[in-house]
Amino acid sequence: MTQGGCLCGAVRFEVRAFSSGVFKCHCSKCRKAFGGASSAAVLAAQDDFSWTRGESAIGEYRASPGFLRRFCPACGSILPQHLADFNSYWIPAGLLEGDPGLALWQHIHVDSRASWEVLDAHTPARPAGFDS
Ligand SMILES: [Zn+2]
Ligand SMILES: [Zn+2]
């Protein structure tokens, strides 16, 4: 079981198993939402994910029909999101605590990356989404 939560601890969750490795998305929206070179996230089947504290307080912002970001209203940490179409949760990897046993899996949307970003040489890098 992997525990995770936001910076202030108001929102907490746990994950029994992951269904992907860590993927970093370099699209312009993820860069804005995370304030960094990319997002870093992992997937879990919805049955393997549970909120343990603060779910009712979660705020959300929809940048476009396909781009929703949920956040802790107290500390601003970006939070996991249910992907109903995939029966999965999208989980920001930086929220996870301890060693979740994950490895970096893919870079996606690298054609949109920041001009100053340098990618590592050995991780698969997709020009756009996972299937590109
Ligand atoms: Zn918080
Ligand atoms: Zn993105």
Image: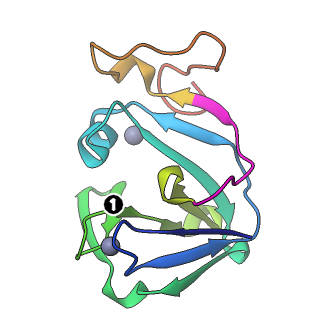
The secondary structure making up most of the magenta span is loop
Q: Quadrant of the N terminus?
A: bottom right
In the image, residue 100 lies in the stretch drawn in magenta: yes
Residue 50 placement, left or right of 116: right
| Residue in front for this viewpoint, 117 or 129 | 117
Instruction: Report the residue at 33% width, 73% height from top.
Output: 8
Disc 1 marks a residue whose amino acid type is Leu
Residue indicated by mark 1:
68
Q: Quadrant of ligand 2?
A: top left
Colouring of the image: rainbow
Instruction: Report the residue at 42% width, 13% height from top.
Output: 118
Q: What residue range appears in magenta? A: 97-106
In the image, residue 63 lies in the stretch drawn in magenta: no
- Percent x, y of residue 20: 70, 47
* Image quadrant in which you'd find residue 86: bottom right
| Residue in front for this viewpoint, 17 or 82 | 17
* Image quadrant in which you'd find residue 37: top left
Q: Secondary structure at mark 1?
A: strand
| Residue in front for this viewpoint, 85 or 39 | 39
- Percent x, y of residue 52: 55, 86
Residue 101 placement, left or right of 95: right
Residue 46 placement, left or right of 74: right
Instruction: Name the residue furthest top.
Output: 121
- Percent x, y of residue 49: 65, 74
* Image quadrant in which you'd find residue 96: bottom right
Whether 19 is drawn above or below 87: the answer is above
Instruction: Name the residue furthest front.
Output: 98
- Percent x, y of residue 17: 76, 63
Instruction: Report the residue at 32% width, 62% height from top.
Output: 77
Local crowd size for mark 1, using a 10 Å CA cut-off: few (<14), some (14–19), many (≥20): few
Whether 73 is drawn above or below 131: the answer is below
Q: Quadrant of the C terminus?
A: top right
